Image: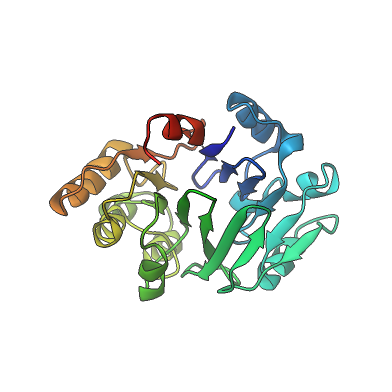
């Protein structure tokens, strides 16, 4: 498949697929290998076709399958040096790493990839701007606070995958311990529905084709509420842009580059 599809998004595991004519990659691999294989099968892609995995940070819900995918399937892992060190602390074998520098653009086959720094409670977390020959993707989740740098990098994307993790009142009301609530609501935690909506309002433009709301909390958010808040923000800014939920337990709506071209959208 030439296109984009979130395979899983949330605290139980994260994994995204992006494929072009020449390159097929995963962004994070925080679900089991069997589930990755099954999800790829659903969109007509074989695990053997995956050329690389980009890693945003070393939390388990982003790296669960890294050990197996690297050692048994020979897939190279792209990460910055601090994230690579963090990954290695919890693995039985040494993955094949290709180290990038945060803030520096690099190329991989026909992809141009720019990792940029975000606020989260890990060693050196990043989001990605990934440019294919015809499309620009902004992948930005697990972020506690939207900086000027984030806003700058997410300008002029064709597709956005943006965190809408929680509703603050639901976090305060949940049965989790206070340390959890402070982490989620803090500047190195996760983005709320309102913060996500405000970000979308600031970076939306006429060329933005679709938006995915990512990493929704299963107990401190509601998909309908997240969609409503994001949709109202974009509407207030004068935009009517399709918004999708990136699901935790099933693959999400796929963007097919072939279909988009046949419709004359690109």
Q: Position of residue 160 (x, y in %)?
A: 40, 51
Q: Position of residue 67 (x, y in %)?
A: 78, 50
Quadrant placement of the C terminus: top left
- For residue 145, say whether it is visible: no
Q: Is residue 90 left or right of residue 206?
A: right
**Figure quadrant of residue 33:** top right
Q: Is residue 152 left or right of residue 89?
A: left
Q: Position of residue 12 (x, y in %)?
A: 55, 43
Compared with 124, 185 (above or below) is above
Q: Is residue 43 left or right of residue 239?
A: right
**What residue is drawn where x is 58% and y is 59%?**
112
Q: Is residue 228 left or right of residue 78?
A: left
**What residue is drawn where x is 43% and y is 29%?**
262
Q: Nearer the viewer, residue 215 or 111?
A: 111
Q: Nearer the viewer, residue 221 or 226?
A: 226
Q: Nearer the viewer, residue 15 or 123?
A: 15
Q: Position of residue 119 (x, y in %)?
A: 46, 70
**What residue is drawn where x is 63% and y is 66%?**
106
Quadrant placement of the N terminus: top right
Protein image colouring: rainbow
Q: Nearer the viewer, residue 110 or 193?
A: 110
- For residue 166, say whether it is visible: yes
Numbered circles on residues, count: 0
């Amino acid at each position: 498949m030439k296109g984009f599809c979130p395979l899983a998004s949330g605290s139980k595991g994260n994994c995204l697929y992006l494929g072009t004519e020449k390159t097929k990659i995963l962004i994070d691999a925080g679900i089991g290998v069997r589930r990755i294989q099954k999800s790829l099968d659903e969109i007509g892609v074989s695990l053997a076709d995956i050329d690389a995995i980009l890693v945003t940070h070393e939390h388990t819900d982003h790296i669960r399958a890294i050990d197996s995918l690297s050692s048994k399937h020979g897939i190279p892992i792209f990460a910055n040096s601090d994230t690579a060190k963090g990954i290695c602390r919890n693995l039985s074998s040494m993955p094949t790493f290709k180290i990038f520098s945060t803030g520096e653009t690099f190329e991989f086959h026909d992809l141009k990839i720019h990792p940029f720094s975000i606020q989260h409670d890990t060693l050196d977390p990043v989001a990605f701007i990934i440019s294919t020959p015809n499309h620009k993707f902004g992948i930005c989740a697990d972020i506690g606070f939207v900086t000027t740098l984030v806003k700058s990098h997410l300008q002029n994307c064709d597709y956005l995958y943006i965190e809408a993790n929680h509703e603050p009142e639901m976090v305060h009301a949940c049965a989790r311990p206070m340390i959890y609530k402070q982490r989620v609501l803090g500047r190195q935690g996760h983005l709320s529905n309102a913060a996500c909506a405000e970000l979308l309002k600031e970076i939306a433009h006429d060329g933005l084709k679709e938006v995915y709301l990512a990493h929704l909390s299963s107990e401190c958010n509601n998909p309908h509420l997240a969609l409503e808040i994001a949709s109202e923000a974009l509407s207030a800014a004068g935009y009517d842009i399709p918004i999708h939920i990136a699901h935790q337990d099933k693959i999400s709506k796929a963007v097919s580059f072939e279909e988009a071209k046949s419709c004359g959208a690109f």
